[in-house]
Amino acid sequence: MRASKTPRASLQTEVTTTGMDRISGALVMAFALGLWVFVIPDQVDAADYGWMRPRTLPQILAVTLLVLGALLVLLPSRDRDATAAGPAVPVAIGAGLAGGGVLAMGLWGFALAAPALALAAAVFAGERRWPWLLATGIAVPAAIWALVTVFLGRPLP
């Protein structure tokens, strides 16, 4: 007996971008709540210097993540096509770069790690012009250092 040439039903379920948007939004909301409830109170110290409390910016970012995650849950994409794994690779590389940057700053401090991280991020984003790479590797970390250390009066690692 010959095998049938009709396609068999797949056991895999197709995940639509709408479903992935809702799942992603819920995960972002959970992450934001975790930051607000656990990380910020535990990891941000009180300081009696500077004009802004140390918790202000992390709390603003946590609320922003919470609101944007809620928007993603409530207003997902209308595209019904199955999502591809292709975008996951750059996201994973970017997450690894960010995690490596945090680790490097903990080991070697902001002054050494930030220029290398900024340069790596620019190259990862596709920048190849050396003046822009130089500006990204030097000017961006210098501006962040000036904003945080000089204007906000907060130490960097």
Image (cartoon, rainbow, N blue to C red):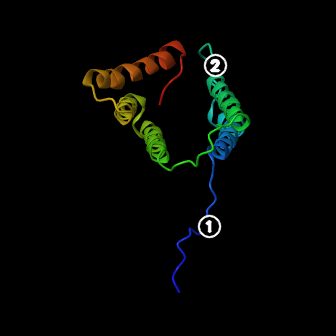
Residue 65 drawn at (x, y percent): 65, 32
Instruction: Looking at this view, name the residue that lies furthest to the left.
Output: 130
Q: With respect to residue 140, does 25 lie above or below?
A: below
Q: Is residue 67 left or right of residue 122?
A: right
Q: Position of residue 56 (x, y in %)?
A: 65, 22
Residue type pointed to by label 2: Asp
Q: Is residue 25 left or right of residue 107?
A: right
Question: For numbered disc 1, what is the local secondary structure?
Answer: loop
Q: Are marks 1 and 2 in contact (CB under 8 Å)?
A: no
- Foreground residue among 88 and 49: 88
Which percent across, then down, holds residue 132? 31, 22
Nearer to us of marks 1 and 2 is: 1
Crowding at dot 2, Cα within 10 Å, few <14 / some 14-19 / many 20+, comes out as: few
- Residue drawn where x is 48% and y is 27% of the image: 156
The count of marks equals 2
Q: Quadrant of residue 96?
A: top left
Query: Residue tagged by mark 2?
Result: 48
Tell me which amino acid carries mark 1: Ala
N-terminal of the pair, mark 1 or mark 2, is 1
Mark 2 residue element: loop
As rendered, which of 76 and 120 lies closer to the eye? 76
Q: Quadrant of residue 29?
A: top right
Measure how far apart labels 1 and 2 are at the Cα level: 65 Å
Judging depth in this view, the residue of 151 and 3 nearest the camera is 3
- Asked if residue 8 lies left or right of residue 92, the reply is right
Residue at the disc numbered 1: 9
**Within 10 angstroms of label 1, few (less than 14), some, or many (20 or more) residues?**
few
Observer-nearest of 124 and 37: 124
